[in-house]
Amino acid sequence: MATQHPADQLHPVTGAWMPGDPPGHRQFLQFDADRPFALDSGVAMHGLTVAYETWGALDDSATNAVLVCHAWTGDSHATGPAGRGHEAPGWWSGLIGPGLAIDTDRWFVVCANVLGGCQGSTGPASADPATGSPYGSRFPVVTVRDMVRAQARLADHLGVDAWHCVVGGSLGGMQVLEWAITYPQRVRSILPIATCAQATAQQIAWGAIGRRAIRLDPKWRNGDYYDAAPGDGPWEGLAIARMVAQVTFRSDNVFTEKFGRDLADGGTFGGAIDLWQRFEVESYLDHHGVKLISRFDANSYLIIGKAMDLHDVGRGRGGLAAALRRITMPSLVVGISSDILYPNYQQRQIQELLATAGDSRYAEIDSPHGHDAFLINLDQLVPLIDDLFTKVAKG
């Protein structure tokens, strides 16, 4: 039977979590409306919400807290089953939980949806307190530093003066570095994975293509599409943007071994050649594009992607080397052997600069899976996490 094409399906206008939806395991911190939150752009926002999840318990000395930071299209559901409020299982369920590498019987684990996201934290799909309508096109540009400053308010709310470790991959790794530079007194160790200290031209280029795909979707309506009927939102632009990104998340070898030159739906090259006859890899990309539509928002994809492109820890701090010299706590920087999106030379560079000021080492995930290996090859992360956590706990 032929696979249903995405264009034949009726897609939601947005996959954002909205008030009134089942909260699942989410908790919510509402910022004081009278205390504005200043962004790097100069915009002051009011009444922000941060959605977060926690596992384990904070000990009496408040020294066992671990912050886990999610990647681009991740959210606060780092571990746990799918269910009401959570379309998919936790993205690091194999690492976080009782008896696992990040043992919730020992550690108080926190993961927050980033500012600008769409799974409970304030983002473009959220209601603007000033109008009661979704921010849409009026939502300001945010930076990774803005995301981290919002998380710092969450830490205050939770009674966490200092994290035992801040850990995350990709965008999560960017947050890790910003935490260590902005709040060095509040971080005892860091574990950035498959990330960079500043976005390169090629990384920005990939992001720009995705943004253009969304912008050129006529159903995007310049960002104000939330009142559209189902099927009339910018699903196609978002799906294409995700398809572009998905190519960078895996390696050439994996694509070749999994799909080769096979045609989709059992097609062969023995008959007539059709312009729109699809290869199997195209079906794979369609699948991932459609999968994202159901749980993400096109405007959030733009906002978070822009934050990643703007990422530069050296901005306003005297340059890259000067900024990273502020990080003196123990660090373990992890690269991936086959990563084409964030090549391991970037993680090696981070580690070399960190080693000039503190105790830092480099480790590498040996995997054919490319950038996504930090979500796949969890067995290689287990001993790395254990070594760093144990070392810091011993002082």
Image (tube, rainbow, N blue to C red):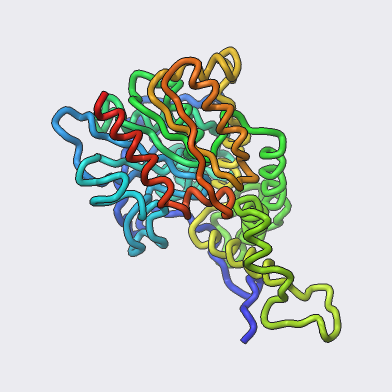
- Name the image quarter holding residue 337: top right
Position above or below: 279 against 159 = below
Q: Position of residue 75 (x, y in %)?
A: 43, 48
Q: Residue at x 20, y 29 (%)?
A: 62
Label count reads 0
Q: Residue furthest right?
A: 272
Q: Quadrant of the C terminus?
A: top left
* Residue 264 can be seen, yes or no: yes
Q: Is residue 137 left or right of residue 122?
A: right
Q: Quadrant of the N terminus?
A: bottom right
Q: Nearer the viewer, residue 103 or 129?
A: 103
Spot occupied by residue 124 in the image (x, y as percentages of width and height): 52, 44
Examine the rendering and report whether any part of residue 220 can be seen.
Answer: no
Residue in the picture at 60% in, 61% down: 289
Q: Is 330 drawn above or below residue 107 in the view shown?
A: above
Horizontal and vertical percent position of residue 13? 55, 60
Query: Which is more toward the observer, 34 or 17?
Result: 17
* x and y percentages locating residue 231 in the rendered image: 59, 67
Instruction: Residue at 59% x, 38% y: name it.
Output: 344
> In the shown orientation, is residue 204 left or right of residue 139?
right
Residue sitting at x 51%, y 41%: 364
Above or below, 322 against 302 in this view is: above
